[in-house]
Image: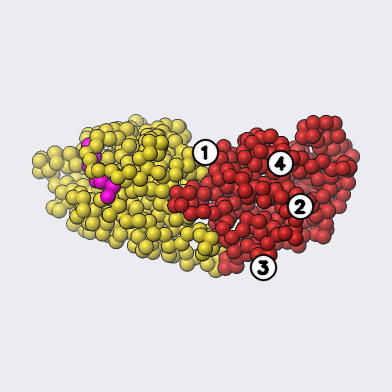
Chain colours: A yellow, B red
Amino acid sequence: MMRLEAKKMVATGDYTAAYGALLCDVDVVAAYPITPQTIIVEEFSNFVNNGITDAEFIMVESEHSAMSACIAAQASGARTFTATSSQGLALMHEMLFVASALRLPIVMPVVNRTLAAPIGIWCEHNDSMPQRDAGWIQMSCEDNQEVLDMIIMAYKIGERKDVLLPVMPCLDAFILSHTVEPVDAPSSDEVADFIGKYDPVATLDPNNPMAIGTFSPPEYIQELRYQTHVAMENAKKAIRETTKDFARKFGRDYYGLIEEYRCDDADVVLATVGTVTGTAREVVDELREKGKKVGLIKLRFYRPFPAEEIKKIAENVSAIGVYDRAISYGVGGPLFIETRNALYGLDLPVLNFLAGLGGRDVVKGDIEKMYEILLKAKKEKPEKEIYWIGTRGVSI
Amino acid sequence: MNIKDLPEEDYFTSGHTACAGCPAPAIVRNMMKIFGKDTIVYTPANCLLVFSGTYPYLAWKVPYLHEAFENTGSCISGVARAYKKIGKKALVVGIAGDGGTYDIGIQALSGAAERDEDVIYVCYDNEAYMNTGIQRSGSTPYGASTTTTPAGKKIPGKLRHKKDMAEIMRAHEIPYMATLSISHPKDFLNKVEKAKNVKGFRYLHVFSPCPTGWRFDPSKSVEIARKAVQSGMWTLYEAEYGEITGIYKPKKKIPVEEYIKGQGRFRHLTPEMIEELQRWVDRKWKRLYGEEP
């Protein structure tokens, strides 16, 4: 591929994701267009057709085929990339499990879009979060800079020999995918130096033939499940080390699996995910000015889940809230479920705030409301755990 | 090419667990002799996957991949493109059954053919989902009794005819497509060798009578395959870029009734149903040979 100089770009999240793949010098891309991921495949097509990369781009006829082809290409020794969203991710579901069990570090940005019905194109996390048990490292980005940095780090983390898992960096539909922001892009040399060459453990090779993914009786499967579980646990260490290395090399620190904001002396904290984090930072600053001791946890990773990190913070606060943009019907938001699980045994209110579902905007007033409920929960036992913020017909 | 010219070296070896009389191992073994060492094989879910490679046993001496059922077309595309990008050379072959080709896999197959991926796609056609227990597929012929089209008192077997998958693939105007049968080994080997030497998307469709699913004497697989060709139930031909370049016409066309004899799946057929099957064969005959049967 052509050498790319470091530059400052003003780019959409989608362009940034495509540029990230370019910087990582991927060998094979197999993808299918879906709103709002389309710009990623269009931009990558531009890179290919203008000779900026000599990557093979397989324009498949479905997302199921996109993931199938990526798995086959990665198993053949290629570094692969794809991207999808919503219905496309749901169609891929079957193949996600194959990618992780075959321990293939494919990287796939997912532009979070609501999953039908009813059909919609705006931001919701009910596409990626149901993929929880597929064995993918799954994380959410706050801004376009993080999209770029996370794609670079995704290859570094996924390709580690103690991890070897596929990675799914998520970005909010339109709020990031179609919104231009300033992005610092490193040079391709710097990225190559950081992530290294893909060095597969096992590949399809006539000179060393082996079977990959073949039929297995019960005598062999349970051990593979255990190994994948260990790999996901190892990913925590890999993420912490990689964000440190990244900060040293590129000057931007993402602090491992979560980022704390003004948590040190906080009475109550709110955990957020995706772009809502940016809005919540402002609310925290404003409430702090008013003397309210509030803090913020930016939940970056959903898998592996930062249980230890959250527990450490929770030990020093009076109430914790979790913001979710998805719902596990009858139980609560997926991040809330995880957080409550992580805090089992601690005696403090853990509350869930659902807002922005189907792509509705989450504004400062919504987040102020969340903190208000949390500060109240510090004083008196809350009546319920789950709060539907700004939902017609539901009183808080 | 003749059988005696085939290389001795095998890349699909003994030790597999196929049923007695199953033609699939012979199909694969002979194809692999021609494809040779530098071949990468993908199989979706099918009998072949289970009988040739249940871990820790393996009948293959070439790299072998399985991912899922419906994606042979896209998996072989992925291997071929990765090899192209990395600069390595191998013949990439997918071997699917009729369920994985006619039904659940037709989308990925069509996509790969339309993109003209540099691969060989093989369909071994035993006219039902044999691996899951003889359920009907789009390839199951009219009247056949399967576990999901049982010959019942009200509905006597499958009431739809076999889908013409070979013609669907010819319509993709791919560089090479051919239909094959184990009853015609010389034709079989020539077509496999030809496919190996063509660049781009190649489709080989092999008729594969299943003693277990069709309920016939396992020593009769080749005989039944031959009768399929002689009756017109299966037509041997090849096409390049959509144009038929060769077609085999049986010297004497036998009635369908003679083909279905000895197959338990057709035992319940009434004279009217046999006539309906004959009408389908005669229509296909006219379409492919351009003349009345």
Horizontal side, residue A304 vs residue A33: left or right: left
**Dot in front, 3 or 2:** 2
Above or below: residue B7 compared with residue B68: below
Same chain for mark 4 and mark 1? The answer is no
Give the magenta part as a residue range.
A182-189
Q: Could you tell me which secondary element the residue under label 1 belongs to?
A: loop
Q: Numbered disc 2: what chain? A: B
B223 vs A76, left or right, is right
In reply to whether residue A200 is colored magenta, the answer given is no
For disc 2, the neighbor class at 10 Å (few under 14, some 14 to 19, many from 20) is: some
- The disc placed on residue B238 is 4
Which SS class for mark 4? strand
- Mark 2: secondary structure: helix
Screen quadrant of the C terminus of chain A: top left
Q: Nearer the viewer, residue B217 or A389?
A: B217
Q: CA distance from mark 3 to mark 4?
A: 33 Å
Residue that numbered label 3 is attached to: B15
Label 4 close to label 1 by CB (< 8 Å): no
Residue A142 in view in this figure:
no
Image position of B70 (left or right of A226): right
Name the residue type under label 4. Answer: Glu
In primary-sequence order, the first of circles 2 and 4 is 2
Q: Is residue B9 left or right of residue A205?
A: right
Tell me what residue is drawn at x 72 percent, y 38 percent. B245
Callout 2 amino acid = Lys
Tell me the quarter of the picture where residue B203 sits: top right
Marks 2/4: CA–CA distance? 14 Å
Q: Are marks 2 and 4 in contact (CB under 8 Å)?
A: no
Which residue is disc 1 drawn over? A61
The answer to whether mark 2 and mark 1 are in CB contact below 8 A is no
Front label number (2 vs 1):
2
